[in-house]
C-alpha cells in the first residue's frame, strides 16, 4: 500500500503531469478484442496518479531493435518530452521462432512472397483468431524450427544505443527491464533450455550495461514461469496477445515496477520532496 507521495499543502503542491514514454510491443495496441481503455498502460495511469497525487500520462510506442532504433527513440523523446522512459527487451525479438522468417532467409527473394503472405495471415484478425489456422500454424512450428528476428547480442547493442540517447536528457529518468520469462511456449526440454539460455544472455548483458551506465534495471535470473507460475494465461483468440483480463492482471506487476521510478521523477523536480511510500 502506498500513501500519497507528496505534501498536500498549497505551498508544497507541485502539479504537473508525469509523462511516461512506454516503449512497448504489439500487446500495447488496441484490437477487436481489447479496446484502448482496457490496455495495461491505460489502466496504470489512474493507479499511478492516485499513488503519486499527480496526473499521469503514458504514451506507448512499439520499437524493434533495428539499426535505427536509437534514432527512432530520439524522435519520440523530442516529440513527447517524457520525464520517464520505460524500455523493456521484448522476448518476441530474440526468442520467437518464426517459420516465415526462416523461409525468407533460406530462399532469399524466392521465399519472400511466401514469408510475407504468411506474416499477413498472422496479422489478419479473423484468420489469426481462427482455431483451424492456429492448429495448422502450431503443427508447422513443432516440426520446423523457425528463425529468430534478432540475436541476443544485437538486442543488447541496440538497447544500449537507445539508453545512451535517453540519458542525454538529464531531466528524464530511465528504467530498463528484460523479459521475465512469464510463459513457457516451448514444445520440449531441449527447446526450453535453448530459449532460456538466450533470455539469460539478454538479461545479463543488459544488467552489466545498466550497471556501467548507472541506470535502473529490473530482470530475472530465473524465469517467472518457474518462480511465479501463472495458473492460467488470459489471451485473445490468436493465443499470442493478452485479452482484457490479461491486461488487468498485469497491472499490479507494472505498478510495482514503475512507481519507484515515478517517485524519482518527483524527487528530481523538487529537492525538498519527501517520499512517504511504505
Image: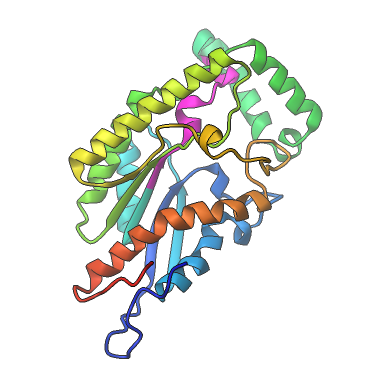
- Judging depth in this view, the residue of 180 and 42 nearest the camera is 180
Give the residue displayed 23% in from the left and 67% down from the top: 268
Q: Position of residue 180 (x, y in %)?
A: 47, 37
* Colour mode of the rendering: rainbow
- Image quarter of the C terminus: bottom left
What secondary structure is the magenta-colored segment mainly?
helix
| Residues rendered magenta in the picture | 87-104
Q: Is residue 80 visible?
A: no
Q: Count the marks: how many?
A: 0
- Judging depth in this view, the residue of 253 and 150 nearest the camera is 253
Relative side of 249 to 224, left or right = right
Q: Is residue 127 above or below residue 3?
A: above
Judge whether residue 201 is colored magenta. no
- Judging depth in this view, the residue of 222 and 198 nearest the camera is 222
Q: Is residue 44 above or below residue 106?
A: below
Q: Is residue 224 above or below residue 2?
A: above
Q: Is residue 224 visible?
A: yes
Q: Position of residue 131 (x, y in %)?
A: 79, 31
Q: Position of residue 67 (x, y in %)?
A: 33, 31
Give the residue displayed 29% in from the left and 36% down from the top: 207
Residue reaching furthest to the top: 107
- Judging depth in this view, the residue of 50 and 108 nearest the camera is 50
Judge whether residue 97 is colored magenta. yes
Give the residue displayed 34% in from the left and 53% down from the top: 85
Q: Position of residue 124 (x, y in %)?
A: 69, 36
Residue reaching furthest to the bottom: 10
Q: Quadrant of residue 42?
A: bottom right
Residue reaching furthest to the right: 132
Relative side of 248 to 253, left or right = right
Amino acid at each position: 500500500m502506498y500513501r500519497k507521495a507528496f505534501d498536500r499543502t498549497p505551498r508544497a503542491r507541485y502539479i504537473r503531469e508525469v509523462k511516461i514514454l512506454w516503449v512497448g510491443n504489439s500487446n500495447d495496441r488496441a484490437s477487436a478484442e481489447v479496446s484502448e481503455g482496457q490496455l495495461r498502460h491505460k489502466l496504470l495511469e489512474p493507479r499511478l496518479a492516485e499513488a503519486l497525487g499527480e496526473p499521469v500520462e503514458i504514451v506507448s510506442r512499439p520499437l524493434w531493435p533495428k539499426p535505427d532504433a536509437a534514432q527512432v527513440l530520439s524522435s519520440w523523446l523530442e516529440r513527447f518530452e517524457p520525464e520517464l522512459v520505460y524500455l523493456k527487451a521484448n522476448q518476441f525479438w530474440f526468442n520467437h521462432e518464426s517459420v516465415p522468417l526462416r523461409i525468407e532467409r533460406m530462399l532469399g527473394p524466392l521465399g519472400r512472397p511466401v514469408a510475407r503472405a504468411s506474416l499477413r495471415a498472422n496479422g489478419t484478425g479473423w484468420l489469426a483468431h481462427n482455431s483451424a489456422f492456429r492448429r495448422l500454424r502450431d503443427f508447422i512450428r513443432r516440426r520446423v524450427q523457425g528463425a529468430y528476428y534478432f540475436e541476443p547480442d544485437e538486442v543488447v547493442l541496440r538497447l544500449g544505443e537507445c539508453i545512451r540517447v535517453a540519458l542525454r536528457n538529464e531531466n528524464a529518468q530511465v528504467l530498463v527491464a528484460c523479459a521475465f520469462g512469464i510463459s513457457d511456449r516451448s514444445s520440449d526440454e531441449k527447446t526450453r533450455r535453448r530459449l532460456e539460455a538466450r533470455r539469460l544472455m539478454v538479461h545479463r548483458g543488459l544488467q552489466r550495461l545498466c550497471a556501467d551506465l548507472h541506470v535502473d534495471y529490473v530482470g530475472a535470473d530465473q524465469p517467472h514461469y518457474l518462480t511465479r507460475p501463472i495458473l492460467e494465461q488470459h489471451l485473445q483468440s490468436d493465443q499470442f496477445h493478452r485479452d482484457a483480463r490479461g491486461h488487468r492482471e498485469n497491472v499490479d506487476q507494472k505498478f510495482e515496477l514503475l512507481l519507484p521510478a515515478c517517485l524519482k521523477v518527483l524527487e528530481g523536480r523538487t529537492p525538498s520532496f519527501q517520499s512517504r511510500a511504505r
